[in-house]
Amino acid sequence: MTILDTFKSRIQAAQRILITTHEYPDADGIGSEISLCLALRELGKESWCVNEEPLLERYQYLDPDHAVLGHKEFQKKHETFSPDLVIVVDTNTHARTGKHLAGYIDGGKFKVLYIDHHPCRGRDLSNHCIDVTSAATGQMIGEMIEALGVEFSKKIALPIYTAIIIDTSSFRYPTVSASTHRLVAKLMATGINPPEAYNGIYGTKRVHHMHLLGKILETTSTNSDESIAWILLRKQDIDNFAGDVEDTHAFINNLLVLNNIKVAIMFRDDGPVVKMSLRSSGEFDVGTIALSLGGGGHSHSAATLFNKEPGQTTEQIIEKAVKKVEEILKNIVTD
């Protein structure tokens, strides 16, 4: 049975469907869940997107039908809603959905279907829809909507198009394929204007954003052969420049233009926790690197978290992490 067969059989057997994504979602998870929800409504399914928190204002233009609700609002308005199926998009573990949404998944009370393109190492999710070769969860959702026989309207197409832009870093990752662009062509045929879609999700920037980017790029460091480069983003920097964490996700991509770069890293110091985001120039699998450090992700984009130990500084965490990455790269080259 193919992934599309699995998906269609699960949808056909359900009438009331709850869709969610990971906690603190960006546009890939949000766009995927919105488009799927609207498509299911076209088939007469009672469908809702329910996330741990309400939709941020910056993403509301993707949801003119207000299909996405925060958990508290959903409980208040639809307290008797009991789903036949819970669909989780853009993650394949219930722990990442947040403590309230995880309650719908954990314990086996409701049937669950994961739709995701992230690896699920060491777990058997063969009865779910996991495709690590897909460029984006949004691409999977688009292909699934087609399989249901639902035609793309602009309202359905724009969130998927946006999700694909975000998940592929504007089509720059190696998983982007001809099928990705064929789907994008169909989405654009609904009347999507690429400049408007791009500006809608990335936004036009204020000058303080450029100042923040400049300050962060000043922190750029490399190892001796410049195969690894990293930057440091501190929460106080974001606050001082009246910035938004959401606007900093792409900062790391500036490192990928360096001449000898193999692995780019952005460390984000949030106080008790340091987030380490990794990107690959395409030659090395940063998903494996992140896994060895307690995280995970794709071969080209991955992340992990470090909890600060008593007395431990951010600089010590960075030094230790970079050394580990360097050792892994040397082993790969040696092998």
Image (cartoon, grey):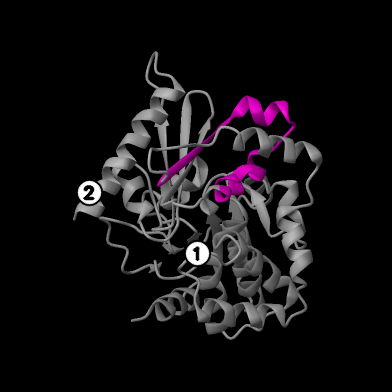
Of tags 2 and 1, which is closer to the observer?
2
Apparent side of residue 114 relative to residue 196 in the rendered image (left or right): left
| Quarter the C terminus occupies | bottom left
Which range of residues does the magenta coloring cover?
Answer: 227-254
244 falls in the magenta region? yes
Residue 177 in the image, given as x and y percentages of width and height: 49, 76
| Of the pair 201 and 320, the residue shown nearer to us | 320
Residue 217 in the image, given as x and y percentages of width and height: 60, 38
Q: Is residue 212 visible?
A: yes
Do the numbered discs 2 and 1 sit on residues whose CB atoms are within 8 Å?
no
On the image, which quarter does residue 238 sit in? top right
* Residue 331: mark: 2
Indicate whether 279 appears above or below 147.
above
Residue 265 in the image, given as x and y percentages of width and height: 47, 43
Indicate whether 46 appears above or below 4.
above
Task: Label 2: state its secondary structure.
Answer: helix
Apparent side of residue 209 relative to residue 303 in the rendered image (left or right): right
Q: Residue at x 37, y 36 (%)?
A: 322
Number of dots carrying numbers: 2
Q: Residue at x 78, y 78 (%)?
A: 191
Residue furthest top in the image: 311
* Residue 173: mark: 1
Q: Earlier in the sequence, mark 2 or mark 1?
A: 1
Q: Residue at x 66, y 51 (%)?
A: 69
